[in-house]
């Protein structure tokens, strides 16, 4: 079901347009598990975000009073308080801030409550870091840059509004899956993405019941071919044994 | 056989035996008694006649020439039952008589003295007494029988009511049972034990459920750490082949564990009835949505899909749960399909049916919906998909069954 959710989010994204200049984006991660906090922080930092992490409700409150963040990634279960209370606080003091709730409980109540209180998205542990990154990006697009620029990656340009792609100034006709695949790759550029993460992003949770992912290669191959045809570089690398990487170099 | 019937039958059987045996005993005792008395009377009369002959010889009333022989023969006497012809009102009658024949030597002559008495009146007498006693016994048996039945029925009534309550007991509803009170010690004790037992079952079940849910929740965070750490590890440059292999293995194992955990949580949530909201759902919309999601998988196996339905069938259910049912049924139909196979979906107001071509099941059909029962040896399958479908069906009181005819698997849900 979360798969459908993901796709829906993606569709919603297309209403808003993204500027890729994300280097100013400030993100606060509230997560009581230090290890998880570290991984998340290091992943997002590599995606050119300014990241800060706190482990407790108290610290988070402190930070939120002092600074302004674009995005807060919020774990609901904190040792010294409920993340939902923090959410209320954020929405009161700074409604501009986008909030992404992270919870170990995949409970519908929590989800609805969170979304009711003004959270923008909800993700359940455990998650793919690339997926979290995708959600953060889509959140930024929705929050900040409604109706502005296209996503640009070297000679590839994506217009999320029209869901159209131009490479080397030549329009490429992509299928829906190829389009979302490309968007996912560019959002998580320079990162190794496993085919499991890709499949989950594109088809949702349910597909793990099926064990044949051959058609991912098909989509990938077609996407590659179509980009190459325009004379643009092939940025897609196959990383032996692990997955794929969309690389600038 | 019901205990009621069993006791009744035994009772009736023994009553009949007792009735027959006692009647026979009464009949023969009476007969014996009366015969003895009659024989005594015959003997008495014989003696009387003998004395009359002896002292008032000849007899005053009639001449006695009924002596057998002048030479004395040995005195004997014997009894026998004999038929005697009588003429009553011009009608010849045969009647049974008891007869005492004796030879007596008196005054040098041997007399044959016969005394006899009608057996008929005895017979009548015995029969009447036997019948009346029989009737009394019969009445007694019948009365006891009915009294017993009434007592039994009253005594067992709470038992049967409690049995019904127990039959309705479901551990999943999490309701304590309230048993009917009774004034019979054994049943009271039974009730007490049952109440204790069901309370224990309920609390154990709740503990288990809580444990599963808590354990699954607690596992999510460590899993998330493993997941993200592995993903970070993958980002490192200069990994050699063996490292890549090991990282990949860890990653897949973590993936699997996460999926399993999520699915188990989902199952326990359905069990805990955490999906209460209901909406009117257009079944075909849901099916089409999922067919689109699975489009790649369908095309990959070159499966042809047909969806037939009567108008726009609607149903009231939780949209998330119904999504899961359809998603699992479609993924199931794809997974267990053959290349270039087919899937036929039929929806009506009464049922929803999924048919797909495929190999016959290797496991019994009735275990198909159980957790962790899977037909394939596929490592990515837990055998939980159909368990989820079944759980949702149980939740909504829908019936689900599987059949396999002409190389076609069919799973039908009756609403």
Image (cartoon, coloured by chain):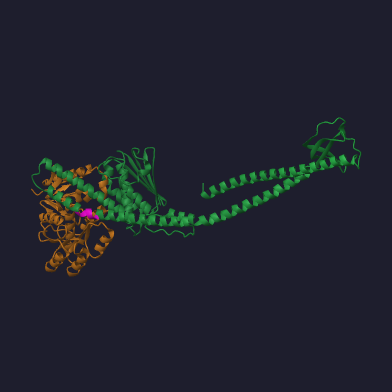
* B219 magenta-colored: yes
Name the foreground residue: B152 vs B161. B152
Name the foreground residue: B283 vs B219. B219
Q: Does B229 sit left or right of B5 as displayed?
A: left
When asked about the image quadrant of residue A148, the answer is: bottom left
Secondary structure, magenta segment, majority class? helix
Q: Please say whether residue A120 is visible from this viewpoint.
A: yes
Chain A takes which shade in the image? orange
Name the foreground residue: B339 vs B69. B69
Q: Is residue B336 above or below residue A35?
A: above
Q: Does B240 sit left or right of B317 as displayed?
A: left
Chain B takes which shade in the image? green
Residue A68 appears at what percent x and percent y? 13, 66
Magenta region: B217-221
Q: Please say whether residue A174 is visible from this viewpoint.
A: no
When asked about the image quadrant of residue B66, the answer is: top right
Q: Does B124 sit left or right of B72 as displayed?
A: left
What residue do we see at 26% from left, 47% from top?
A: A207
Residue B130 appears at what percent x and percent y? 70, 47
What residue do we see at 56% from left, 49% from top?
A: B8
Q: How many labels, in total?
A: 0
Residue A224 appears at what percent x and percent y? 16, 45
* A94 magenta-colored: no
């Amino acid at each position: 079901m979360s798969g459908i959710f993901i796709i829906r989010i993606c569709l919603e994204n297309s209403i808003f347009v993204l500027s890729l200049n994300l280097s100013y984006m400030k993100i606060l991660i509230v997560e009581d598990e230090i290890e998880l906090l570290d991984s998340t922080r290091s992943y997002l930092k590599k995606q050119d975000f300014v990241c800060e992490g706190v482990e407790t409700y108290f610290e988070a409150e402190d930070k939120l009073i002092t600074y302004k963040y674009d995005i807060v990634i919020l774990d609901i279960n904190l040792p010294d308080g409920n993340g939902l209370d923090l959410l209320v606080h954020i929405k009161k003091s700074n409604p501009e801030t986008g909030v992404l709730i992270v919870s170990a409980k995949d409970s519908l109540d929590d989800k609805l409550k969170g979304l009711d209180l003004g959270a923008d998205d909800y993700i359940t542990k455990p998650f793919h870091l690339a997926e979290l990154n995708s959600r953060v990006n889509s959140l930024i697009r929705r929050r900040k840059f409604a109706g502005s620029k296209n996503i640009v990656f070297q000679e590839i340009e994506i217009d999320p509004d029209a869901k159209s792609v131009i490479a080397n100034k030549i329009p490429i006709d992509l299928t829906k899956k190829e389009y979302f695949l490309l968007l996912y790759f560019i959002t998580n550029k320079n990162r190794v993405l496993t085919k499991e993460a890709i499949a989950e992003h594109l088809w949702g949770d349910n597909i793990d019941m099926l064990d044949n992912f051959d058609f991912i290669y098909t989509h990938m191959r077609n996407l590659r071919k179509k980009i190459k045809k325009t004379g643009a570089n092939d940025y897609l690398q196959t990383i032996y044994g692990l997955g794929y990487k969309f690389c600038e170099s | 056989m019901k205990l009621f019937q069993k006791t009744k039958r035994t009772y009736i059987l023994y009553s009949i035996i007792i009735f027959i045996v006692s009647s026979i005993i009464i009949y023969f005792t009476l007969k014996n008694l009366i015969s003895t008395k009659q024989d005594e009377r015959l003997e008495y009369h014989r003696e009387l006649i003998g004395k009359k002959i002896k002292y008032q010889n000849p007899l005053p009333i009639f001449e006695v020439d009924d002596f057998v022989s002048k030479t004395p023969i040995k005195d004997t006497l014997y009894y026998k039952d004999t038929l005697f012809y009588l003429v009553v009102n011009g009608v010849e009658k045969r009647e049974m008589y008891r007869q005492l024949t004796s030879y007596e030597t008196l005054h040098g002559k041997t007399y044959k003295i016969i005394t006899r008495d009608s057996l008929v009146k005895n017979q009548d007498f015995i029969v009447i007494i036997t019948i009346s006693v029989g009737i009394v016994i019969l009445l007694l048996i019948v009365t006891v029988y009915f009294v017993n039945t009434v007592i039994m029925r009253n005594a067992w009534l709470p038992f049967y009511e409690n049995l019904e309550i127990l039959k309705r007991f479901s551990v999943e509803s999490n309701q304590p049972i309230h048993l009917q009170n009774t004034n019979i010690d054994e049943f009271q004790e039974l009730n007490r034990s049952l109440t204790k037992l069901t309370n224990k079952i309920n609390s154990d079940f709740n503990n288990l459920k809580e444990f599963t849910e808590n354990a699954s929740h607690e596992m999510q965070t460590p899993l998330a750490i493993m997941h993200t750490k592995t993903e970070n590890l993958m980002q490192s440059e200069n990994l050699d082949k063996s490292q890549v292999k090991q990282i990949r293995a860890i990653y897949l194992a973590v993936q699997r564990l996460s999926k399993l955990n999520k699915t188990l949580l989902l199952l326990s949530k359905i069990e805990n009835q955490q999906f209460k909201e209901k909406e009117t759902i257009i079944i075909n919309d849901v099916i089409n949505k999922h067919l689109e999601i699975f489009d790649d998988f369908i095309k990959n196996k070159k499966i042809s899909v047909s969806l037939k339905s009567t108008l726009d069938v609607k149903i009231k259910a939780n949209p998330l749960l119904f999504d899961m049912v359809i998603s699992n049924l479609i993924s199931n139909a794809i997974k267990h399909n053959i290349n270039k196979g087919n899937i036929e979906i039929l929806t009506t107001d009464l049922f929803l049916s999924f048919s797909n071509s495929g190999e016959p099941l290797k496991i019994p059909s009735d275990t198909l919906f159980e957790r962790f029962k899977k037909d394939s040896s596929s490592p990515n399958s837990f055998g939980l998909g159909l368990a989820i479908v079944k759980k949702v069906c149980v939740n909504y009181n829908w019936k689900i069954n599987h059949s396999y005819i002409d190389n076609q698997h069919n799973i039908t849900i009756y609403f």
